[in-house]
Image: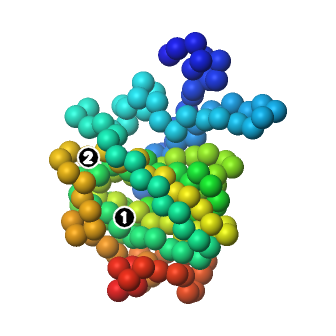
Amino acid sequence: MNRMDLIMGINYIINDSKIIDDIKIITPSIHAESRGSIWTSYDVNSLSHLIPDNLIFNHDKFSRSYQNVLRGIHGDNKSWKLVSCIHGSIKQVVVDMREDSKTFMKWDSFDLEGNNPMMILIPPKFGNAFYVRSYEATYHYKLAYEGTYADADEQFTVSWNDKNINIDWGIEDPILSERDSK
């Protein structure tokens, strides 16, 4: 750590999901003062042990969505995702799609808010989805994978209202993309 890291206290609390194995909940330390606050979403020295040794986070994406938008349930077989909400409020949902898992098709949800930073680490073979509760929200994906990015044509999609998974979204009629409404 350098001097600024020590002053700002780059630390993380890492917890496991109580429902699904291998899902990590990461809460960063926040340096708050009269001008506002600052926090570190990823520090290689503190968090790289959470993904396989041969991978690095090599791709970031941001998604801005409006109230009542539901994005997902999408995933692939190779991408690790570190996700957070940097503005607004969302309901983050993770679904275990590993057929050999004791928690296959189980889900967990997390309240992510821009004013209360928390990240969720999602391994490959998990479905990722979120629902926007605030007027708008900005969602951050940090991705690690080998080779090229698994775009939509290489990803799996599960219906947001699949009766076998039975996610309690707390809504009846979200705004969906064409992909998610099929």
Residue 144 picture quarter: top left
Q: Position of residue 19 (x, y in %)?
A: 47, 57
N-terminal of the pair, mark 1 or mark 2, is 1
Instruction: Specify few, some or many for label 1: CA neighbours under 10 Å numbering under 14, 14-19, or 20 or more.
Output: many
Left or right position of 42 against 97: right
Q: Is residue 16 visible?
A: yes
Identify the residue at horizontal 58%, vertical 46% (top origin). Answer: 118
User: How many numbered tags mark residues here?
Assistant: 2
Where disc 1 sits, the SS reads strand
Mark on residue 145? 2
Q: Position of residue 63 (x, y in %)?
A: 48, 61
Q: Position of residue 146 (x, y in %)?
A: 20, 45
Mark on residue 127? 1
Q: Using the image as rendered, state which of residue 130 and residue 50 is in the foreground.
A: 130
Left or right position of 36 against 6: right
Where disc 2 sits, the SS reads loop
The C terminus - image quarter: bottom left
Q: Is residue 121 visible?
A: no
Q: What amino acid is found at the position of numbered circle 2 in the picture?
A: Tyr
Q: Position of residue 148 (x, y in %)?
A: 20, 51
Identify the residue at horizontal 61%, vertical 45% (top origin). Answer: 117
Q: What amino acid is found at the position of numbered circle 1 in the picture?
A: Gly
Q: How far is mark 1 from mark 2, CA to CA?
A: 16 Å
Left or right position of 130 against 72: right
